[in-house]
Image (spheres, rainbow, N blue to C red):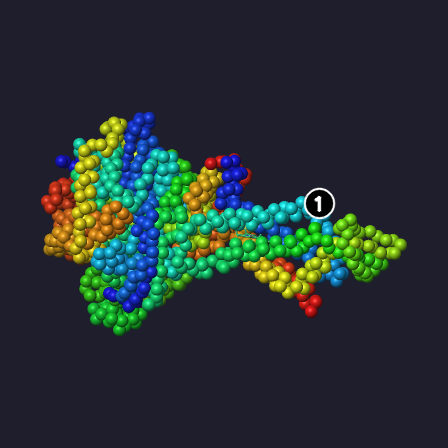
Amino acid sequence: MKLDAKIPEGPLAEKWSKHKFNLKLVNPSNKRKYTVIVVGTGLAGASAAASLAELGYNVKAFCFQDSPRRAHSIAAQGGINAAKNYQNDGDSVYRLFYDTVKGGDYRAREGNVYRLAEVSVNIIDQCVAQGVPFAREYGGLLDNRSFGGSQVSRTFYARGQTGQQLLLGAYSALNRQIHNGKVEMYTRHEMMDVVTVDGKAQGIITRDLVTGKIESHAGHAVLLCTGGYGNVFYLSTNAMGCNVTAAWKAHKRGAYFGNPCFTQIHPTCIPVSGDHQSKLTLMSESLRNDGRVWAPKTIELAQKLRKGEIKVTDLKEEDRDYFLERKYPAFGNLVPRDVASRNAKEAVDAGKGVGASGIAVFLDFADAIKRLGEDAVRAKYGNLFDMYYQITDENPYKQPMRIYPAVHYTMGGLWVDYNLQTTVPGLYCLGEANFSDHGANRLGASALMQGLADGYFVIPYTVGDYLATIGPKAVDTSHPAFAQTKKEVEDRISKLLSLKGTKTINEYHRELGLIMWEYCGMARTEEGLIKAKGLISALREDFWKNAIVSGINEEFNQNLEGAGRVADFLELGELMVDDALNRKESCGGHFRVESQTEEGEALRDDENFAYVAAWEYAGDNQPEVLHKEELVYENVKLTQRSYK
Amino acid sequence: MSGNMNLTLKVWRQKNESSKGQFVTYKAGDVSPDMSFLEMLDVVNEGLVKKGDEPIHFDHDCREGICGSCSLHINGRPHGPKHGVATCQLHMRSFEDGQTVVIEPWRASAFPIIKDLATNRSAFERIQRAGGYVSVNTGGVPDANEIAIPKVIADEAFSSATCIGCGACVAACKNASAMLFVSAKVSQLALLPQGQPERYRRVQAMVAQMDEEGFGSCTNTGACEAECPVGISLTNIARMNRDYFTAKLFKEDEV
Amino acid sequence: MSNFAQTFSSSLGKKLIMSLTGLFLCTFLIVHLVGNFQLFKDDNGQAFNSYAYLMTHFTPIKVVSYLLYTSIIVHALYALILTMGNRKARPVGYAVQAGNANSPWTSRNMGILGTILLIFIVIHMGDFWWKYHNAELPYAKYEISLDNPQDIKVSELPWDAKRLIHSDYVDTQAGKEIVVSKDLYKVVAKAFTTPWYVALYVLSMVALSFHLIHGFRSAFQTIGWDHKKYVPLIRFLGVWIFGVLIPLLFAAMPIFFLLKNY
Ligand SMILES: Cc1cc2nc3c(=O)[nH]c(=O)nc-3n(C[C@H](O)[C@H](O)[C@H](O)COP(=O)(O)OP(=O)(O)OC[C@H]3O[C@@H](n4cnc5c(N)ncnc54)[C@H](O)[C@@H]3O)c2cc1C
Ligand code: HEM
Ligand code: FES
């Protein structure tokens, strides 16, 4: 099958408007004859479900938490970008487009990114109309800040919890439609599989997480809005429940997986404190505006520090290596996420890590406190400092913070065309779950923007085109494909529950995470990746023999939920490794040690790798088939990034 | 890295909503003060699973204090002894070696127990569905800067909007009242200009649903405010009451 | 259900009733207290007995007093209804609940404090109000010199069903104002020299104090009268005036009588 991204012809700025005009419309009186299934009610899913219901479609929406408000989108802190140019500082749709393509290291589609920048302005209007309390200035108008090294202030924010406020907005729109009877909401339901009839997605199989009941749901189209899969690394800044199950099941039913190895590693997270660690906490990017990153100059000093023989405050200025400032005099501590992360890893790998575990570097505010005064620092970062203090019991006003990079976001995901349709007709993918518009690296404050753009402003048009094409013929679960898929789901659950070995699900997950982090994390080598592939497949085999899964299906069983998700991660992990192996260049968050400049920076290979890698599932234990979607750049010139 | 604390846990175990529950005592050994409370329970659960027992079930997700999933009543207090944090942000250094820790689920008839420490908080969902929104469709809305909102109002609305919907207010209240939660939701929209057109319908609808769910009434003890992990203030309750009485006694909107 | 029925059967409506009746009772406390000050006068109860008559026989005041009785009943009834509802909202309690960590004791014990008050009110009304209206009390006859109102001669008249509860006329020949009044003062004075009664009274005033330290402020919160600038004032009034001063002054009377007679 040839990949067709269906990017409309014509000048960049007119693509979306023209496309919208060309899309078929569903007759208003026919809309109520359609049912759309929306899996996932985070920003992408809630906004899609609400918008479709407003149009008149019947929507069935699902999430595994007990409320849509608890989706992982809730945790986003920093903000959401929009090309409003309210600050009169030279922002524009084109600039946001350009920054996003460049920030993604030229591995995203021009057409999609431009559309994203274009609708970004509508998102802010929509959210404000819903009552989202964005930060404001004394004059009563919206405030903006510059985020993630951007040269314009285009980030809208709501103190440190933009994600929660945006999600509450989308959730309220969703609630209104639930109240109106247009959306049927299924909370504590996990999608276990997609049902395809004649090659088209026509429903899903779910498990009621409280009763264990396996249910079939039919719809004219299925939208997957199930978020990212960063938890394949076990430790990440993602919520505990984030998983790949829905996307992975869709993949196995024919949806190609795009750029699975593209992972974003965030440089400023609170480091791991021990084996018990269950997740990592992000410290806002803004900290690097005033904090200086350093490690001890010598291994001996680092060792003494780790053993507690000396205190960090004992280290003299000449014993400290401010490595970012030293290597990147122009950008200093404000280099992009991937560069900052990689350098921290280098310091740690060189034995200069700090903290009891030795896996951390310092982020020091002593200078800022001296320069601005403690009160000014408190006013800017007080809540972050408190959070750090809370978790580590160390006072960052008195001693430097310890930070280390952590997995934060996955740019990869199900491959979708311009209409957000996967390679399975009728199956769509929105938000972080799709391979998205961020290329090989996502800019800060752009994920929220993309999720809402997809849900509010793209899918209502594009799914209509598909629905108009297939017609409002009633669908139900009587087709044998439903019974068949349901049986496969039940069999898999029985198989999981029959596992009565010796190792817990968590132990497998942690082990997988360590492999992924070590070999498919911040720096990837051919040798390491090949090794990882073997380790993962051995681990997977062991899982299906020696894991313990407790309890029964017909009850609330968190152990069983976890088992299913880890089993899917064990399959996904291998695909990520395959993808990383295939992509022999370095780009964005993907750093292949073999592909670097003389100064040790990421080296892209546009000649050979300016494509989206879309992987096709070819059967259990079969190598996946690679399809390439060539990326065509008509508007921006590809350049090598440099921050020296 | 192992820790140096040993604790005795008394945990409420209950198979499902209809069965009878009881306290079961567990030993948590080798607890590190750097662990979060939930990580301590993870370790206990690992041990239980290995022994072939069922792990202790509890809701959790973000583990950053924002999603509102975690909901444990620890030694007599929702989210435990530390002020202003959710259970997932509580660290073991807030406890002492040798301490006995009693862990119970939220207790309220409106929050039936699903299993062990996990409760069904869908009552909160239904309250919000009853009216916790501004009725605008996607598209066709005015420019975001069309209406200036005084910063004090915007900030106040934001403070109300920080509610994470965990239910600690209900859990803390001796009457299992949901007033703090509902009033925070009502307040956010009542303060903002966007919420005005439906202001008096909304408050009536949400209060009616709150009553239907079987929450207790408010005696203004302030326990909710004191235990709220994000510091939602009692002012919200006064504001909601004011709007409710105004709506019922002086406005013509009826629901 | 009509809009009003719906309003007052809602949890907030019931609370509104609690709060309005509670505040009404608070205003009554002031009136009652002012009247009771007559007890401190060294006139053998003349002013007090006149006051008692005024309170029970002046029509507008009578209307208000029936409102007051209704308020007490409604307040207590709704307290009961709400408390029962609150119990139902948490059928299974906590094994450990650290109430003191998050709320003041008074706020959690309004029901108990109120019950003490109710018991007190019943005894109090039985002793004074009931007796005044129905018991065969003797009369006090005050002869007040018109030249010197300080000069009052008092004598006791026996119970007589035909006698007016209170009469007041001026005997110009004798140069005296003659006031004949059912002698509630004596009843009060007697009660207030009975130690167990004084103890009950003082205890009830402690309960009143606690009830109002929380209740006064709470009533405003319930109605929705909450304002950054005025809450401190309400808090002050609630704690110092209604919570401390008023109960203290009430308690001072029986103590005053008790001490006077020792
Ligand atoms: C700590 C942190 C901070 C961040 N900060 C920012 C920021 O400042 N700015 C920014 O732009 N981005 C930020 N991001 C990224 C951004 O928050 C996410 O990418 C985005 O919110 C994802 O939204 P979503 O709707 O795609 O998925 P999610 O919000 O993750 O929602 C997924 C939904 O799918 C459901 N689901 C998943 N699997 C299943 C299944 N099998 N069956 C049924 N339902 C399922 C879930 O219940 C949930 O409802 C941050 C991310 C993290 C981790
Ligand atoms: C008859 C005996 C009384 C009983 C049983 C009683 C009981 C109660 C109870 C249980 C409450 C809390 C109810 C709630 O907030 O939901 C309450 C509140 C209150 N009571 Fe009483 N009380 C009694 C007498 C009084 C008296 C004599 C006064 C005043 C002089 C008074 C004033 C108040 C006030 C102001 C409140 C606060 C109302 C509110 O929070 O909305 N009560 N009472
Ligand atoms: S787990 Fe999300 S708030 Fe605690």
From this viewpoint, is residue A522 visible?
A: no
Q: Position of residue C114 (x, y in %)?
A: 55, 54
Q: Chain of mark 1?
A: C
Along the viewing direction, whichever of C99 and C227 lies nearer the viewer: C99
Q: Is residue B144 left or right of residue B235?
A: left
Amino acid bearing label 1: Thr
Q: Which residue is depicted at the point 25% across and 62% down?
A: A274
From this viewpoint, is residue A574 visible?
A: yes
The residue where tag 1 is placed is: C59
Q: Position of residue A74 (x, y in %)?
A: 33, 48
Give the quarter of the image for residue C211: bottom right
Which quarter shows the N terminus of chain A? top left
Q: Is residue A433 left or right of residue C87?
A: left
Seen in the picture, residue A330 relative to B157 is either above or below; the reply is below
Q: Is residue A574 left or right of residue A399?
A: left
Q: Which residue is depicted at the point 24% across and 60% down?
A: B47
